[in-house]
Amino acid sequence: MSDTGHTGRREGGRDGIRGAALGRAPVPLSVLDLVTVGAGSTAHAALRTSVEIARLAESRGYHRHWVAEHHSMPGVASSSPAVILAHLAAHTSRIRLGSGGVMLPNHAPLAVAEQFGTLEALAPGRIDLGLGRAPGTDPRTAAALRGAGRLDEAADEFPRSLSELIRFLDDDFPDGHPYARVHAVPGPVQGPAGRPPIWLLGSSGFSARLAGQLGLPFAYAHHFSAAGTLPALDLYRQSFRPSAVLDAPYAVIGVAALAADTAAQARAEVLTGALAMLRLRSGRPGLIPTPQEAAAYPYSPLEREFIEGRLVDIVHGTPDEVRSGLDDLAKRTGADELMLTANAHGGEARLRSYGLIADAYGLPVETPEAG
């Protein structure tokens, strides 16, 4: 695994990773957009809402807006992060945009290098490349994406694929390597250019340890694996070795969070996402149900236990309640940044939530730049 220790040239500069807290927020706040599709809506509407969220986040001082790769899930429209990010880049001017993440085993490293090299050329200095080793879907769909024979092999070879991707981005395969004359374009072969910082994402210790060993920033999926947050962050920090990218660890956690005008409204909204997850986990994926459907659903005792367990890990309520919950989470975990995801039926509820949270923290209202 020695080759994965190569981190290449400084990845976009430390300013591309670290963000400054604004207003009264204890750490920078960012957005993880799952591009959810609600019952009665369409993927077109979900993607339009994603643009609206990115523009709101930019105007209210959120640090970055990430989208995540999912497949074969009716309730999300984010199977192609690079395509969505190009669209978001055309509708924003300052906010950092990135993948949270691209599931590297699903793709050839050269293809990812060229996609994100293109994004960096479109929006210089604003692109993050977050990478995961999970499939972002069920095993059958993963097999369809990769080819059945590569399913286990692809995940096991993540460190090698990561090293290969980094070398394509830096265009520095050594002489004699089979890819020494293969160039990712856009890329360094065309002249001096920046390139996106690489992040490792995960919900277990594997990526936490690897990110620490390589001196890369790390993002943990607290929003769906809360029990493992502290162990993973501890492992990341204990494993961290300073690199050309970072002098010290930098950890982001994804947080399910939704604010509404009343606590009852917030609970009604987050219940829709919890029911969607219940159906997904029981092999019945679908569109995100309406609040009315979620309230009327005939939960069995086991289903009710699952739902309540999900809601415990979602920071929801009035804006002040959400702010208090986020402050407590930042303090307990020592996270350097909180990335908020609002998994609810309607785009209006998610947009309002991000606005209310910004208000609760006193984040400034900034005028969007023309372009």
Image: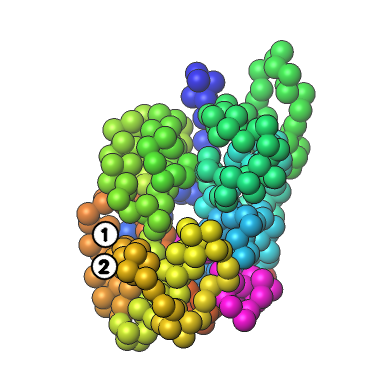
Display colour scheme: rainbow
Left or right: 42, with 285 as reference point? right
| Residue 37 horizontal/vertical position (percent) | 59, 72
Location of residue 181 by image quarter: top right
Q: Is residue 173 above or below residue 188?
A: above
| Residue 359 horizontal/vertical position (percent) | 36, 79
Tell me which segment is drawn in magenta. 30-50
- Mark 2 Cα within 10 Å, few/some/many (few <14, many 20+)? some
Do residues under tags 2 and 1 come within 8 Å of each other at their CB atoms? yes
Q: Is residue 267 above or below residue 21?
A: below
Residue 47 on the magenta segment? yes
Q: Is residue 52 above or below residue 152?
A: below
- Who is closer to the viewer here, 207 or 312? 312
- Report the residue at 54% width, 21% height from top: 3
- Who is closer to the viewer here, 83 or 284? 284
Type of amino acid at the residue the image marks with label 2: Gly
Q: Is residue 359 above or below residue 276?
A: below
Residue 269 visible within the image: no
Q: Give me the disc on residue 329.
A: 1
- Mark 1 Cα within 10 Å, few/some/many (few <14, many 20+)? some
Q: Give me the disc on residue 127.
A: none
Left or right: 190, with 220 as reference point? right
| Residue 140 horizontal/vertical position (percent) | 63, 46
Task: Give the Cα distance between marks 2 and 1.
Answer: 6 Å
Residue 134 on the magenta segment? no
Q: Which residue is mark 2?
A: 325
Identify the secondary structure beneath mark 2: helix
